[in-house]
Amino acid sequence: MLSTKSFFDLSQFPHPTLFDKNKPVWDALNNLKTYMDAHSYPGLDRNLLPDAAPLPHTVIWHEKSFIPAKECSIEYGDTNKGEIRVKKGATELTGAAVIMAGAILCGDRIDIAKGVFVEGGALIKSPAIIGECTEIRQGAYLRGYCLTGKRCVIGHTTEVKHSIFLNDAKAGHFAYLGDSILGQDVNLGAGTKFANLKFLGDNISIRTKDGTVDTGRRKFGAILGDYAQTGCNSVTNPGTIIGQGGILMPNTTAPSGYHTPKKLIR
């Protein structure tokens, strides 16, 4: 009931070995630091990408090289649809990523994949792994150990720490995610907040119909199975697990514990 295979289709996810389909769904959170620490990160060109300071100029990332955007032309299409187009002269730089002036990259362990768009004002602390065609919007704050799949959105004034986004997961506006996992095609309504620490600070347990399960984790936000959704200004208590296709209604606080697939939480 609480195994990974009950929540996620990992067949197209770029990092399937982070998960064990037969272990509890929160096991990937236990593995995240080790997995990301072992990842091979590209070197950052500190002449173009100063450490922990706003980028003075927009930079292009293409084929393991950083290029000043002033040498290129950029067509700002839909990031998630792969419509960012960059040309250097007459040559199209297929798969180029764009990091806008004003973005801040802290540390050297940051991996930005093809087609990514990082808007000015975003702050990314290492380590971070950003999947293909993902958009990091203005004011986003990635606090470290953030990993996304393909075509994700981390939106305006959204704060994320120690969390995983599967392909097409989106937290577009004013959200907080700590120690959490968003499944494939999950969408968070504006203002969604995932609380991840109990007032008393003890381990977080998951209530199920068969009894209570100790996760062994002191910090545990929420896990949403594939295609789950939250409405605007919704909140989850620490240790909330929502099955595939579940819906948390707007202005609603989800009780901690396991919520079955397709459940409407109101």
Image (spheres, rainbow, N blue to C red):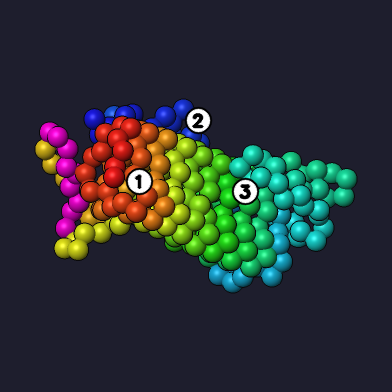
Which of marks 1 and 2 precedes in the sequence?
2
- Amino acid carrying label 1: it is Met
Considering every residue shown, the one lying at the far left of the view is 211
Q: Are marks 2 and 1 in contact (CB under 8 Å)?
A: no
Q: Quadrant of residue 132?
A: top right
Which of the two discs, 2 and 1, sits closer to the camera?
Answer: 1
Q: Earlier in the sequence, mark 3 or mark 1?
A: 3
Element type where label 3 sits in the image:
loop
Compared across the picture, whether 266 is left or right of 206 comes to right
Q: Are marks 3 and 1 in contact (CB under 8 Å)?
A: no
Nearest to N terminus: mark 3 or mark 2: 2
Q: Tell me if residue 106 is in the magenta stretch.
A: no
Location of mark 2 (residue): 12
In which quadrant of the rendered image does the C terminus lie? top left
* Image location of residue 112, percent across then percent down: 59, 50
Examine the rendered structure and indicate whether residue 251 appears above or below residue 183: below
Amino acid marked by disc 2: Gln
- Looking at the rendering, the stretch of residues picked out in magenta corresponds to 202-210
Which residue matches tag 3?
Answer: 116
Which residue is under mark 1? 249
Three-letter amino acid code of the residue under disc 3? Val
Q: Quadrant of the N terminus?
A: top left
Mark 2 to mark 1 CA distance (whole Å): 29 Å
Question: Quadrant location of residue 71?
Answer: bottom right
